[in-house]
Image (spheres, rainbow, N blue to C red):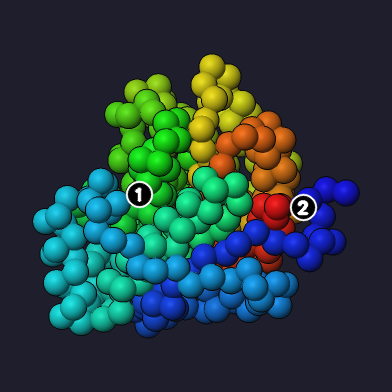
Amino acid sequence: MSRADGQSGAICPVFSHPACFEHSAGSGHPEAPARLQAVKAAIIAAAPAAWHAAPVAPAAPILRVHPAEYLDSLEAFIRQGGGRLDADTGANARSWDAALGAVGAALAAVHSSLEGRPAFAAIRPPGHHALADRPMGFCLLGNIVIASREAQALGADRVLIVDWDVHHGNGTQALVESDPSIRFISMHQWPHWPFSGAANECGAGNVFNLPMRAGLAPQRYVEALWGSVMAATRDWRPDAILISAGFDSMQGDLLGGFTLEPEHYGVWIDRLRTEFPDAPLAALLEGGYVPSRVADGVLAVVRALAP
Ligand SMILES: [Zn+2]
């Protein structure tokens, strides 16, 4: 029986933080608390003991990725009540705690995976558009890069980041593109916001961009991403694998035109676990803007990540 067929009640540990539910990017914003509420309800219904509240992140892991001046100015802006950070990105008075809680949950998922238990971080705000010194695209901190640096600090020298969000992970790319110890694969809709992620953006040979048209049959996306995983690991074995799990690549999402269904995420997880049985594996929530669909996608992933 496949781990991804949804018949088993077993799921992996899921880490979150209460403040992640209180962050608001503004009234009517698609990156809304309802997304995470739907995810939590689905996890609790499947396996209540799997849901864990992580501690907020300490400063040190975040300072590996973001300069102190940026963190200080962002915290001060939020402590004064928040507001609009750019055309797409906003914060309220709870967003700093949410950002630190999101990183804390990401770190907890990494620690769990390195201890032999694959894990999922159910977090918001998302992270893969955040730059070193600037918020962008609903994102404040580079959660997946902070998590990757933590894995490296704990001995996983080579980290593979797989980003299946429908948008290019431009922030992740900017933060890792000069460092061949991390390889970054992003499959994303093209042309589409943020209009980066062309196939010829290769970084130091460690960036694998896979721009794809909207509206293709789902199997096209499944095999294309898997082809990039194989290409990125042909001569390079990852010591840990972290996934930027955006569910805006699902059929019917408000902000994307891909056609994936929950089972397809399970296929990728199954293949990664088969191909890299010794590599710790953790997934972090990125986008996905139809709450019930995000919940279904997360359920498929946490079932595929079950021990
Ligand atoms: Zn996205």
Residue corresponding to mark 2? 4
Q: Tell whether 240 sits left or right of 3.
A: left
- On the image, the x and y values in percent for residue 19 come to 39, 77
Q: Residues within 10 Å of mark 2 (few under 14, many from 20)?
A: many
- On the image, the x and y values in percent for residue 303 come to 71, 58
Residue 217, relative to residue 83: is it above or below? above
- On the image, the x and y values in percent for residue 238 come to 52, 30
Q: Tell whether 121 sits left or right of 141.
A: right
Cα–Cα span, label 2 and label 1 = 28 Å
- One can see residue 46 in this view: yes
Q: Tell whether 127 sits left or right of 166.
A: left
Residue type highlighted by circle 2: Ala
Q: Secondary structure at mark 1?
A: helix
State the residue at coordinates (24%, 58%): 59
Q: Residues within 10 Å of mark 1 (few under 14, many from 20)?
A: many
Q: Which mark is residue 101?
A: none
Residue 203, relative to residue 214: is it above or below? above
Q: Nearer the viewer, residue 125 or 12?
A: 12
Residue 94, relative to residue 256: is it above or below? below
State the residue at coordinates (19%, 69%): 75
* Rendering quarter of residue 21: bottom left
Q: Nearer the viewer, residue 185 or 57?
A: 57
Q: Residue furthest front?
A: 115
* Rendering quarter of residue 31: bottom left
- On the image, the x and y values in percent for residue 179 come to 32, 29
Q: Residue furthest top?
A: 235
Residue corresponding to mark 1? 146
- One can see residue 165 in this view: no
Q: Nearer the viewer, residue 122 or 206?
A: 122
State the residue at coordinates (68%, 39%): 273
Q: Secondary structure at mark 2?
A: loop
State the residue at coordinates (18%, 60%): 71
